[in-house]
Amino acid sequence: MVVLAKLGAPSMPGFMMDRRRLMLIPAITIGIASCQYTFEKAAAKAEFADMPALRGKDYGKTKMRYPDYTETESGLQYKDLRVGDGPSPKKGEIVVVDWDGYTIGYYGRIFEARNKTKGGSFEGGDKDFFKFKVGSGQVIPAFEEAISGMAPGGVRRIIVPPDLGYPDNDYNKLGPKPTTFSGQRALDFVLRNQGLIDKTLLFDIELLKIIPNQ
């Protein structure tokens, strides 16, 4: 022991304390990781937690007015990015549209992107675009209202308050529906948040074609 002390080696009590400290480090690390996993798991569940006390409340529903948009009596706000040419669609006619969708009230996340092939022919290609019959109740009220004042070739941007959007916060009930899983997930996250976040949506609608009544 005297020789060890003279050579600068650690004494036995101090050496044992150092070993205990080293053994504690992995245990502490595992404990922290476990707590972090538990917290993240709980947070993930809370994303879609149903909160009955908040149902039907007006939390997160924006009333913002955009000065460069035209507001209709229903509360829809729109702006024509490109004015089309020709007559507007009539009730009973089928319209072919391309569209973008964004959760403008929640970080502006895109849930659908326009995929029109520029310069492409419509012949045989209509099936790749969204189609619906005007006045048939197949789409959300905002979409129906917006398309009724457009002409072929036009592009209209609309800001959709929750009461003109998807009924019961379910995009499966009325169109348009996102065509990708990631888009459906992004939209569903906003719609299902029981009013905790702003559910205002933004759409860009391009009217490609009007199919007359047969």
Image (cartoon, rainbow, N blue to C red):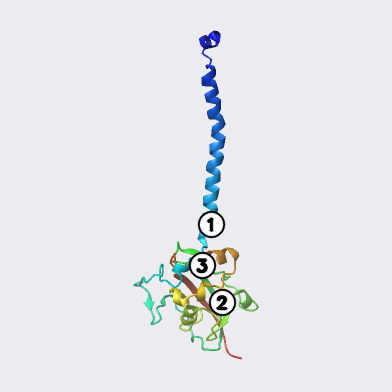
Identify which residue is drawn at 53% across, 64% down.
186
Q: Position of residue 72 (x, y in %)?
A: 39, 81
Q: Is 79 or 189 nearer to us in this picture? A: 189
Residue at the limit of the structure toward the left, as seen here = 67
Identify which residue is drawn at 54% across, 58% down.
45
Look at label 2 and name its amino acid.
Answer: Lys
Disc on the earlier residue, 1 or 3: 1
Label drawn at residue 139: none
Disc 2 marks which residue? 173
Look at label 1 and name its amino acid.
Answer: Ala
Disc on the earlier residue, 3 or 2: 2
What's the CA distance linking mark 3 and mark 2? Answer: 14 Å
**Closer to viewer: mark 3 or mark 2:** 3
Up-down relation of residue 207 to residue 200 (above or below): below
Look at label 3 and name its amino acid.
Answer: Arg
What's the CA distance linking mark 2 and mark 1? Answer: 26 Å
Secondary structure found at label 3 = loop
Label drawn at residue 44: 1
Disc on the earlier residue, 2 or 1: 1
**Closer to viewer: mark 2 or mark 1:** 1
Disc 3 marks which residue? 192
Up-down relation of residue 201 to residue 12 (above or below): below
Up-down relation of residue 10 to residue 186 (above or below): above
What's the CA distance linking mark 1 and mark 3? Answer: 14 Å
Up-down relation of residue 47 to residue 158 (above or below): above
